[in-house]
Image (cartoon, helix red, strand yellow):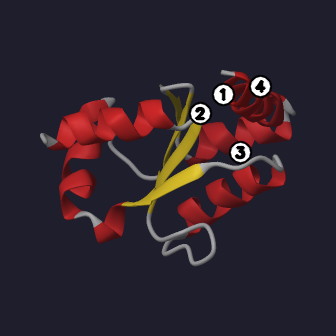
Amino acid sequence: MDVLERIKQQVESSPVVIYMKGTPQLPQCGFSSRTAQALQACEQEFAYVNVLADPEIFENLPRYADWPTFPQVYINGELIGGCDITLELFQQGELKKMVTEATENAKAT
């Protein structure tokens, strides 16, 4: 399967996905750590992909959504943004609403 197809499948198969360096339990970069913490604070399950463990995804994810940096957060198949945008949404209370709505809608279907 083409790497962009794999990314598309990952993004569409989970309501909330973070592409990050490391894992939520063992992040390998400060931006990934802060972004994962914001998602964890939303108290909903989310998927993650460790881009350091998959060089193909690491090299091609920036092309997928035309976003050059990591982490990248997707909700309902759409790129929300990276660390700064995710933290801003979290501080405004919007991230929790978005994550909760996405995960509850996924459970309902």
Q: Position of residue 66 (x, y in %)?
A: 30, 30
Q: Position of residue 4 (x, y in %)?
A: 21, 36
Disc 3 versus disc 1: nearer the observer:
1
Residue 83: mark: none
Q: Pointer 4: residues within 10 angstroms few (<14), some, or many (20+)?
A: some
Q: Residue under circle 2?
A: 15
Separation of residues labelled 4 and 3 (CA atoms): 18 Å
Sequence-wise, which precedes: disc 4 or disc 2? 2
* Above-or-below relation of 95 to 59: above
Dividing the picture into quadrants, the one containing residue 86 is top right
Q: Going by the picture, which residue comes out furthest to the right?
A: 93
Separation of residues labelled 4 and 1 (CA atoms): 9 Å
Disc 3 versus disc 2: nearer the observer:
2
Sequence-wise, which precedes: disc 3 or disc 1? 3
Going by the numbered disc 2, the residue's amino acid type is Pro
Q: Residue under circle 1?
A: 106
